[in-house]
Image (cartoon, grey):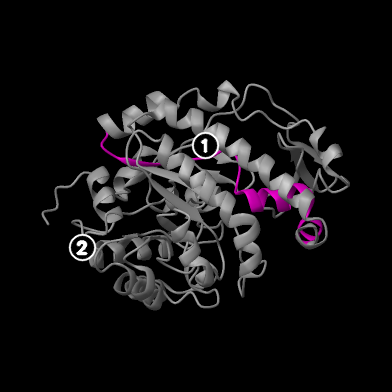
Amino acid sequence: MANDLTSLERVRCTLEHREPDKIPFDLGGSKVTGIAATAYKNLRDYLKFPVIVISIFDIVQQLVLVDQDIFDYLKIDIKMLNPGKPIDPGLSTDIKQEGNYKLFDNEWGQGWRMPVDGGFYYDIYKHPFEKITGIEELMKYPFPKADDPGRFKSLKDTAHKYIKQEKVAYLLGRPIAGIFEEALRLRGYEFFLMDIVLNPKLAESILDILTEFKLKYWDIALEEVGENVLIITETDDVATQNGLFMAPEMYRKFIKPRHKRINDFIKKKARTKVYIFYHSCGAVKELIPDFIECGFDILNPVQVTAKGMDTKELKKLYGNDITFWGGGIDTQQVLPFGSPQQVRDEVKRRIDDLAPDGGFVFNTVHNIQADVPPENILAMWETLQKYGKY
């Protein structure tokens, strides 16, 4: 195929499981495919790009907006479109310093903190539902408003600009993580995982509140973007490095029906064919058929170091049914600590495994962290340019 496709055409071709001119490249398209501020600044300095004020869009992960000059230089194919800041702040607070930590609460009342010295991102430390004992008490909580107009302020105009004017694909973001992930954050990991077994009605009530929040958000967001949309992002970390958070049967009972409900709603509401991007870290191989059944079209990040996540086998088993978005290089060891040659070897291997017949968008396994040297980022990118052509 001639190398004259627009980014939008290239991505659409890939999602249709056809081979475009080259593998699409995502860096900075979402909260799970981005680059941390320190690594981004180091990359700009290394490339001798102008010194600018770097814009952080995700406070928790310290992720930056990729500027147009880097976007063009690295031939990135994906842009980001996230909801805006709500007008009603809910329970959110400004960042303040207490002792050795910077900390803040988000609109749900979750508490996040980062060490002042040597901190690269915020960790959750306060779970607002932790002391709730029953459904009646839960329903009195001051939940944020999914339909807050601030969330939708610029969606329509930006979507039109990206699709109609720039001819570039974008990832349409969401205001919260997945229903399971947010339930863990709100209730506390130990409490919610126990609730599933010991207090399932409370667990389901929390999941239903989060599901309804998502449905209301997507209803308005999809109305705003109209036909100018291709990819919807959803996320729910349901696995660890070595296995699932829960037995597959528990996922199928508590989480899968709600995932399917959200996905069915999105695809019915959308004015054009959309592809749903699903992010889950960890060893999710066992659930990939379930993801496909409930309407996910894209799997991210393909954590290659997790148990069972062999890229060659995954492509063979599921490459006709789902697009792999990520898996381009391990971000736990190889990208931050490997030599440039080790980076090149890893990227070449993942391209060989995942690229045939389309259905592969190149991205790292999750965000590029602060300690990744720019030499390795460029070694990754140069290898993609060399071997990423069809």
The residue wearing badge 1 is: 55
Does residue 178 appear in the picture of this structure?
yes
Q: Where is residue 314 in the image (x, y as percent from the top left)?
A: 40, 73
The span picked out in magenta is 166-193
> Which residue is outermost to the left?
2
Of residues 307 and 208, the one nearer the viewer is 208
Q: Is residue 151 above or below residue 291?
A: above
Of residues 83 and 134, the one nearer the viewer is 134
Q: Where is residue 327 in the image (x, y as percent from the top left)?
A: 43, 66
Label 2, residues with CA under 10 Å away: few <14, some 14-19, many ≥20: some
Look at the numbered disc 2 and give the secondary structure of its residue. Answer: loop
Residue at left offset 32%, top offset 42%:
273
Lower sequence index among marks 2 and 1:
1
Of residues 170 and 99, the one nearer the viewer is 170
What is the three-letter code of the residue carrying label 1? Ser
The residue wearing badge 2 is: 389
Residue at left offset 82%, top offset 32%:
140
